[in-house]
Image (cartoon, rainbow, N blue to C red):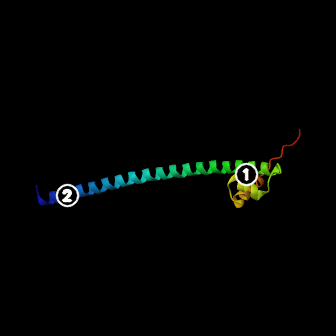
Amino acid sequence: MSRQQDQQRARRNQHEGLSGRTRAQRERHRRAELLIAEVLNVLAQRDAVVDELERRAGRCLLEIQALGWPPSRQAAESCGIRLRDFSRLRNLVTDEPRIKVSDR
């Protein structure tokens, strides 16, 4: 074989090696993007569950207040939460839009 053919073969092998690496890099990048989308989806689901549980806690706190039991500070202490969190949870429920049911 001539020197020119050897050089061409070496360039072709180098090019194929580079394209193989880029193909592998593209595949890893695509896999990472799919995993990132999965993480974002799972976190959004978690946030939705936390939101619903906090609203349930807020409804319970409103019921405690409706019973005329202790003042907010004592109720918060009894629940093991700060007064700030007591108010935040309660406000989640009181800020919810009300759906009016009309009489038919």
Q: Which mark is residue 10?
A: 2
Q: Position of residue 43 (x, y in %)?
A: 56, 51
* Spatial CA span between label 1 and label 2: 71 Å
Quadrant containing the N terminus in the rendered view: bottom left
Left/right of residue 73 with respect to residue 53 in the rendered view:
right
Give whichever of discs 1 and 2 has the lower sequence position: 2
Q: Residue furthest top?
A: 104
Quadrant containing the C terminus in the rendered view: top right
Across the whole image, how many numbered discs are drawn on residues?
2
Mark 1 vs mark 2, foreground winner is 1
Q: Position of residue 88 (x, y in %)?
A: 71, 58
Q: Residue furthest left?
A: 1
**What residue type is disc 2 on?**
Ala
Disc 1 and disc 2 in contact, CB within 8 angstroms: no
Left/right of residue 81 with respect to residue 5 in the rendered view:
right
Question: What residue appears at the point 72 percent right and 56 percent down from the top-left corner?
Answer: 76
- Density class for disc 2 (Cα within 10 Å; few <14, some 14-19, many ≥20) is few
Q: Which mark is residue 58?
A: 1
**What residue type is disc 1 on?**
Gly
Left/right of residue 72 with respect to residue 26 in the rendered view:
right
